Image: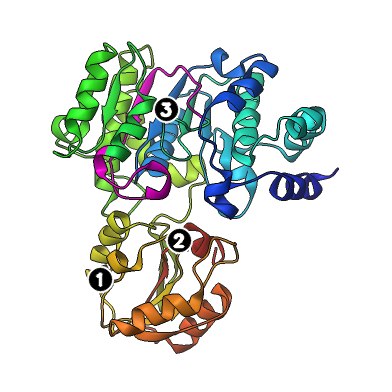
Amino acid sequence: MNYSETTAWMFSRLPMYQKQGASAYKEDLSRTQLLSSYLNQPEQNFKSVHIGGTNGKGSTAHMMAAVLQQAGYKVGLYTSPHLKDFRERIRIDGHKIPEAFVIEFIQKHKTFLESQQLSFFEMTVGLAFEFFFQKRVDIAIIEVGLGGRLDSTNIISPELSVITNIGLDHTQFLGDTLQKIANEKAGIIKANTPVVIGESQTEVNAIFTQKASALKSDIYFADQEISQVLDCSLLGNYQQKNIKTALKALGVLGTRGFSISQQQLKKGLLSVQKHTGLRGRWELLSKSPNIICDTAHNKEGLTLVIDQLQQQAFKRLHIVLGVLAEKSLDSFTDIFPKQAKYYFCQPNIPRAMDVELLTQAFNKKGYKGQGYDSVEKAFTTAKEQALKEDLIFVGGSTFVVAEVL
């Protein structure tokens, strides 16, 4: 099999949360542990940091990786989902996993993967851990895929756990209150292993402190301990919170044998995209008119992005918007500005919300706009109708952003 045939097999043969949603979510770690044993537990042979949370975990992971690379370490980075190419999920020092490694891994282990009916995500985690082990990384930054306690990544023994914040997202899997979601995400806290919480939240702080206390783990709240933030090449206002989380987490790593100077810290944060290849976070795609995209996809994340949009200078605001079917539109619509012109669309995945439903829900609440049967059509129409002094925003889902990059 060549690379495209290999990834086609991965996407079609294995259930995948990204495409299917709930049916790809496994409610225990037994199959991941089975795969780990079969591969001789590669994850036990490199140091790691585990990052969970509702929003900001991807940005925080990339910031930490960039700084550690700047400090001279060989850094693995595992994140999800990808935007354009599956290999974005697995990188070392910013370089994507080679196609040949993906092909070889699947060919070598295909019989086992099929016989155990491993999910796309479980298999990808195994691939990442094997790659990081074989290439002898100094440390790997591992982003949780969904939740924490039952996430496939939760078989590592990290140097440090990080939980960015808690919001109401993926409630069909994780629970419908902040407390229930916090309990799931607290599942990545390990015994005698420090944990950094990005944002203090009165509703859930006690859940984290009690769990850390029971496991004899030191706990730090980044927003209480870090007052001054450094400049960062990621320009979203919301990144201020993630910078604090990354700074505190890197500080804790410094007490565990990782040497990072203030100069390396500053330089690394100013080179996040350059060092890691991160895209889609308050990214300016072009000027005249300004076109900005962002992968924020839940109420908390989008509220911050919309606030920053409103602070920009523009004559008229155009919003290309698509969301996933599991989103609750009632809680969702009110955060968007009424004065914008909307181009509703649905990304090309089965989980996308039907564009007619989306359009009707917004029109009913007085928003002006129409639906298009593809992201490309919506985006093209917005560009045709926008004047040079206007602003176009593309977002609502990672998968909408992926189609305009």
Which of the 4 image quadrants contains residue 220? top left
Distance from the alpha carbon under mark 2 to that under mark 1:
17 Å
Q: Main secondary structure of the magenta part?
A: loop
Q: Amino acid at mark 1?
A: Asp
Distance from the alpha carbon under mark 2 to that under mark 3:
24 Å
User: Residue at 31% of width from left, 47% of height from top?
Assistant: 176
Q: Is residue 182 left or right of residue 83?
A: left
Asked whether 245 or 176 is in front, the reply is: 176
Q: Is residue 75 left or right of residue 396?
A: right
Q: Which residue is mark 1?
A: 334
**Disc assigned to residue 50:** 3
**Disc assigned to residue 364:** none
Give the extent of the magenta segment: 153-179
Name the spot of residue 366 as percent of width and height, x first: 28, 85
Contact, CB < 8 Å: mark 2 with mark 3? no
**Crowd class of label 1 (few under 14; some 14 to 19; many from 20; radius 10 Å):** some
Q: Nearer the viewer, mark 3 or mark 1?
A: 1
In this picture, is 281 found above or below 191?
below
**Which of marks 1 and 3 precedes in the sequence?**
3
